[in-house]
Each structure stands twice: as C-alpha cells, then as structure tokens.
Image (tube, rainbow, N blue to C red):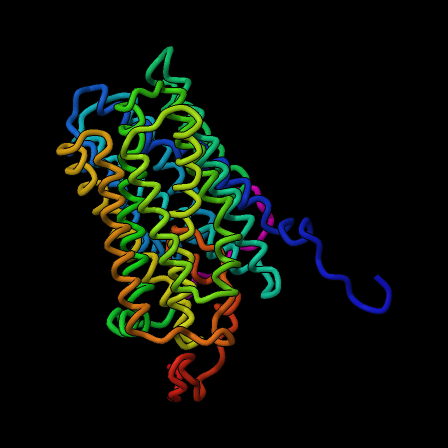
Amino acid sequence: MRGGRARPTMFATILPVRSLLVAIFVMMAGSGFLSTLVGLRLERAGSGTMVIGLVATAYFAGLVLGALRAGEVVRRVGHIRAFAAFVALLSASTLTYALFQHPALWAALRLVDGLCVAGVFICVESWLNDRAEPATRGTVLAWYMVALYSGQALGQLILRSGNTAPQIPFELASILISLAIIPVCLTRSAAPLLEGAASLPLRRLFEASPLGVAGAGITGLLLGAFYGLAAIYARRIGLSLGDTATFMMTVILGGVALQWPLGRLSDRYDRRRVIIACFAATLGISLALAMAPTGALLLGLGALFGGLSFALYPLCVAFANDRLLPSERVTASGQLVLLYSVGAALGPLGAAAAMTLAGAGGLFLFIALGAAAMLAFGLWRLATSAPVPGAAQQDFQILPRTTPVAALLDPAGPDLPAPSTESHPQTGDTWKSP
C-alpha cells in the first residue's frame, strides 16, 4: 500500500502463534470428547446417574484447582517444560482409563485431567497474550477459540471408533494428546514470563455487577451439567453411539456460530436485555429438549441450545466490564472464570439428581430451572437498576471459559493505565485507581 503502512493480514497475525494454535487443536481433539466417553462407559458398566455426575464433577474440580495452582508450576519451570509435563500426564491418565474401570479411580483420573487441561490453558493463553500485539489481540483470541472448539467438536467423532474394541478411543486420544507436545517443543518462539494480576474482592465485583456475577456462575452450572451428562441423555432417548457423537458435535459447533452475532447485538442495544433474552430462549429450548425430540429437530434444537448457552458467559463478562474501572477488568474476568468453574463443578450433581427423578429429560429440566432463575433475576435487575450508557459500554469480545489467564487477552488488559484518577462508567464518581 502506498502512502502508509499496510495493516497486518490475518495470516501475518496468526503466523507467530501457529504452533500454539496447532497444539491446542490437536490436544482438544484428543481430550475434548473424554467427558462424553467416560460418561457412556460408566453407564454401560451399570453405574447410576449420581455416580456419573460425581465423576463429571471431579473434572471441573480439577479445572478449578489447576486454574488456582498450575500457574506456579509454569513460573517455576517455564512454559515449554510445564506444557510438556501437563500434556504427558494427561496422556498417561487417558491410557489408564483403558486399563482399569472403577468409578472411584475414574473420578481421580478426571480430577487429574482437569488439573492438566487447566495447566495447558495457562501455558497457551499467557503465551498468546505475550506474542499478540494490542491491535491484533482480538483476532488472535478468535483463532484460539476456533482451534479450541473445532478440536473439541471433531474429537467427538472418535467415539465411533469404540464399536470394535473398547480401548481404541482411549488409545487414539492418548496419541493425539501426545502429538500436541511436538509443535510447542519445536517452536522458535520465545516463552514469556507469567505475570500476576491485581486482586479484586468478589464483594466489590458483585456490588458492581450482580447480573454479570450471577450470570457467570449460573452459566457454569448449566454448561457443567450439559457436558457432564448430555451423552447419557442422548443414549437414554435412544440415540446410537454415532448419533450421540453427532449431537455433541452439533451443540459445540452451534455454540461457536452464534457468539459473534449475539455479541454484536449486545453492543448496539442494552446488554442486559440481550442477556435476559438469551436466558429466556435457553429456557424454552431446554424445555423442548426435555421432551426428547428426534432426528433433525433434535440436532436443530441442539445447535440453538449451544449457540445461546455458549454466548451467555462472554455476554455476562462484557456486562460486568461495563460497570468496572479499566484497571479492574482483567482481574474481574479471572474471578468470573473461577465462578463459572465452581458452577460447572456443581452442575453435574444437580443434573444427575434431576435425571434420577425425571428420567433422561431431567437434564434439560434442570438446565431450564437454572435459566428460569436467571431470567427472573435479570428481569428484577432490569426493573430496579439503570442501564449503562451506550457510550460507556465496552465492545463485546469472544472469551473462552478456560482459565483466568484468558482474561489477559482482552485488548485493554496489557495496556492498563498507570495509577490515576478514574471515573466509574455508570455513576461518574471518581477515585484513585489501584
């Protein structure tokens, strides 16, 4: 381009981080379907719904533990060594499923899986943040999400390989997870230093945005229930193993497809109304899924459920950020990830109890109940609080529900202002930033 400097192309933007994107895609292709597979194998072995829910909860508990503690490992030994260690342990854990089948052992393995996956996310997300320029962070994050969820969706197809020999899916998963080490170990990109973020009391966060905080926690509850028990729901309504894999893949891909359109809509209108509308639509679709539709209707409803429910978390984060100081947003996003993870750890237990009482449809009745509670809370907040002025709203950004380090990929994150007098986006009150 004459007369000025050309903007970097999409290819030039992702080229410096291509090895990380390939690694996360391959790892998620190998590990992203394990929750589905473990649930199906436990049910086939005669385990009750509550036992399956407890095993699913162990994974999300591992995610919480890893999000809190794995960063210390990365700081101590560096990104490449920590990544290799987490992936190697995850690969070994995956092979162990094929050797022994007992709910207590598998719950322990799922805890290890969650811890390792959180460690991998911390390595990759902090590395991406270090390599991305402020002007290209949004693009980098979008491609990170494409790689993550595409791998998770395509990995569901490995479920079909278990028809001939039950150990094959675990072996294929272990192979893929092990291969994820190669791009990172061979990269010429310098690994960054992992920095900590300033603290933000949860009480301050809730006072600033009750709807954002409650929405993040309830969304974790709903999606934790789905990931933990959706495969059991699919099998109990009569789907074959292959159809179950297709259903799970459709929900995940639908979840990626609608995030951007809904986010753009929330930038133009009162974000609270978009969040409330998404919870209302999730409520209606969940009730429809509770009646066990079949065929194309089931897949269509599944895609809509994924599209709406996956968008809820980034919408709630964006709304919370609208009501916070710029210097608080990175830490607040990390707090919201942890709230989501705690909700996700509790979700499978509640859904398992609902399925015990109401059958397969109990999963989506539980999800509908959570959506109804948030709908009522959202309507109450809409009636009792003022909206954020349009000029004060932050642009929507797609966010993965992974670890607090993902919050640093927010374009405002690395460029926070020095301590100065700041104005609250809603009240206009001023005070010194921390």
Residue shown at 32% from the left, 57% from the top? 216
- Which is nearer the eye, 33 or 320? 320
Q: How many marks?
A: 0
Residue 185 at what x, y percent from top left?
52, 42
Q: Position of residue 3 (x, y in %)?
A: 85, 69
Q: Position of residue 281 (x, y in %)?
A: 37, 48
Residue 47 image offset from top left, x and y in percent: 16, 25
The correct choice, above or below, for 218 with respect to 147 in the image is: below
Looking at the image, which residue is at 17% across and 38% down?
Answer: 354
Which quadrant would residue 88 be assigned to in this image?
top left
Tell whether position 153 is magenta.
no
Secondary structure that dominates the magenta span: loop
Quadrant in which residue 297 is drawn: top left
| Extreme-right residue of the structure | 2
Q: Does any portion of residue 65 appear in the rendered image?
A: no
Q: Is residue 124 above or below residue 178?
A: below
Looking at the picture, tell me which residue is in the foreground, 300 or 34.
300
The residue furthest left is 357
Q: Which stretch appears magenta?
A: 185-195
Q: Is residue 393 left or right of residue 332?
A: right
> Quadrant location of the N terminus?
bottom right
Vertical placement of residue 177 versus 142, above or below? above
**Residue 180 can be seen in this image:** yes
Query: Which quadrant holds the C terminus?
Result: bottom left
Residue nearest the observer in this picture, 365 or 107: 365
Whether 150 is drawn above or below 42: the answer is below
Q: Residue at x 30, y 54 (%)?
A: 340
Residue found at x 43% / y 85%: 423
